[in-house]
Image (spheres, rainbow, N blue to C red):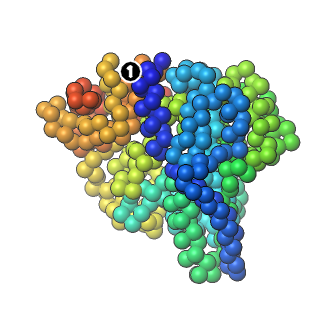
Amino acid sequence: MLRFRQKCRLVARIGEVINGNVSSINVACSRFKCHRKREYSTEMEARKTCLYDFHVENNGKVVNFAGWLLPVQYKEAIAISHQHTRTSASLFDVGHMLQTRVWGKDAGEFLESLTTADLKNLKSGGATLTILTNDNGGILDDLIVTKDGQDRYFVVSNAGRRKEDMELMNQRLDEFIKRGKKIHLEYLDPLDQGLVALQGPMAAKALQNLVKIDLSKLLFMNSVETQIANCNVRITRCGYTGEDGFEISFRGRDARSLVGMILEADEVKLAGLGARDSLRLEAGLCLYGHDMNEDTTPIEAGLAWLVAKRRRAEGNFTGAERILTQIKIGVTRKRVGLMLGQGPPARENAPILTLEGERVGIVTSGGPSPTLGKPIAMGYVPTDLAQRGGGVLVEIRGKTYTATVTKMPFVKTHYFTGK
């Protein structure tokens, strides 16, 4: 169980990453016309997902996460929800994420102009994790792009970058339209389109009872449009916990009935964003704005695999010069995992020092690991200190503690690849 103070710090840290942008933009553009409808609220007015009332009715501890009203936990402690996800299945509301439809003859070219993905060779129904980059090779966001078919894509990106991502896509859209390209964009409103993540080793069993398709044939990072009862849904086998699981997108008006059906399974419990954060940390997964940002390249972050082979050869993505140079000659700092002893957890911005006491880096994410029973963290250090098994010091509240550079993920992942 997390102590009260630790819970408060975790809640505060999660709140920092969910952007308070409250604009909703629906865009429908083509070569011949461009219509944009904007609805703005003040930054003081927190936004809700289509499951907000459901969370309140089910005793979710709802907190204003920098503009979004979401549950950090339910009746059970965060650590208990965390362990339930590792052993059974949990359902998370992630409807604050930005869901975008992109289609048209030039949709693939449009998305490739923004990312490092190889969408030409992505099969229909396939999904890929990719990144938006700036001119200096820095990461603007990480996102999942699904190829629904020829010239049709579905994009899910971070809530904390909703405003920036829409501005970037709208700017690039204008450029393409001026060149006579045909692209349509539609940003889905969180009240009109929900998104939940069903995660854990029992997730497939619970979901299989609700769908006619054979989930054993739906592999990790693949997506299908189907039905649960009479509700149209998109099911993508992916998640942010390191466990097998699914993200399910659905119409807002179906939210209550659909979630109710999923929760009828004995294996499934509701979980909040507190457990989601500790689960992704154990899985060694980056959190935007913490473990990566506009000043961090994918090579420094240990995400070189996100730069597709064809895109490397063509060198035609934003920031390619710096990223390709780093792939060739290396970097001066790297993201590493840190395993601490039985002392206090190292939180974000905790200094990392050499064994001689020289400050050389900072912790970007850290906290207790309910699975391992000891504190873990991620951070950036010079490459000569990034070797696994090496020792460093971490400064926590004025005292230093020994940490070991460790392979990630900290806890073995269980993605369903069919192997």
Q: Quadrant of residue 319?
A: bottom left
Residue at 40% across, 52% down:
293
Rendered location of residue 288, percent (x, y): 45, 47
Q: How packed is label 1: few (under 14 Cα within 10 Å), some, or many (20 or more)?
A: some
In the image, taking residue 91 as reference, residue 290 lies left or right, namely left
In the image, is residue 300 above or below residue 37?
above
Look at the picture and state if 368 lies above or below 171: above
Instruction: Kindly state the secondary structure of the residue where label 1 is placed.
Output: strand
Relative side of 211 to 396, left or right: right
The residue that label 1 is drawn on is 374
Task: Name the amino acid type tagged 1.
Answer: Lys
Q: Residue furthest left?
A: 356
Q: Position of residue 378 (x, y in %)?
A: 36, 36
Name the quadrant of the C terminus: top right
- Going 58% across and 75% down the picture, which residue do you hit? 174
Picture quadrant where residue 364 is located = top left
x, y percentage for residue 357?
A: 15, 34
Residue at point 47%, 45% (across, down): 17
